[in-house]
Image (cartoon, rainbow, N blue to C red):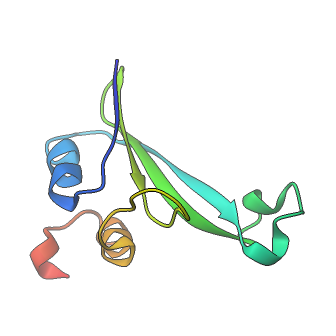
Amino acid sequence: MEYRCVTDFAELREYLDKARLVAFDFETAPREEYRRDEKAALDAHKADIAGVSFSVSEGTAVYVPLRHKTGRNAGSPDKIMQWLQRGCLPIERL
């Protein structure tokens, strides 16, 4: 199995580039004021997207940390989210 953390936009694009089908999952974390609420991470009004997981084939996946409090995050979370919202068009069009 090949699972890895990706913080480089070019590496993410390379992983997703030729995929015909992509599975994804948003990982969320509660905002600071809701940390004690055990279900806050599942409430869009109380949580933020912390990262995104992608898989293009069985046994492979990448995780892109966007807004983690510790560790390394992807260079530009907003740029990555805009790219995803636009259907993964070439970044030059953003």
**Residue 45 seen by the camera:** no
The answer to which of 28 and 21 lies nearer the viewer is 28
Q: Where is residue 54 in the image (x, y as percent from the top left)?
A: 38, 43
| Identity of the residue drawn at 39% across and 62% down | 73
The answer to which of 89 and 31 lies nearer the viewer is 31
- Considering every residue shown, the one lying at the far bottom of the view is 94
**Residue 18 seen by the camera:** yes
How many numbered discs sit on the rendered protein? Answer: 0
Instruction: Classify residue 4 by image quadrant.
Output: top left
Q: Quadrant of the N terminus?
A: top left
Does 16 appear above or below 2? below
| Identity of the residue drawn at 10% across and 77% down | 92
Q: Position of residue 71 (x, y in %)?
A: 45, 56
Q: Position of residue 34 (x, y in %)?
A: 83, 71
Does 12 appear above or below 77? above
| Identity of the residue drawn at 34% across and 75% down | 82
Q: Is residue 82 left or right of residue 32?
A: left
Instruction: Classify residue 77 by image quadrant.
Output: bottom left
Q: Position of residue 9 (x, y in %)?
A: 22, 60
Does 35 appear above or below 13? below
Q: In this view, does 86 lie to the left or right of 28?
A: left
| Identity of the residue drawn at 15% across and 48% down | 17
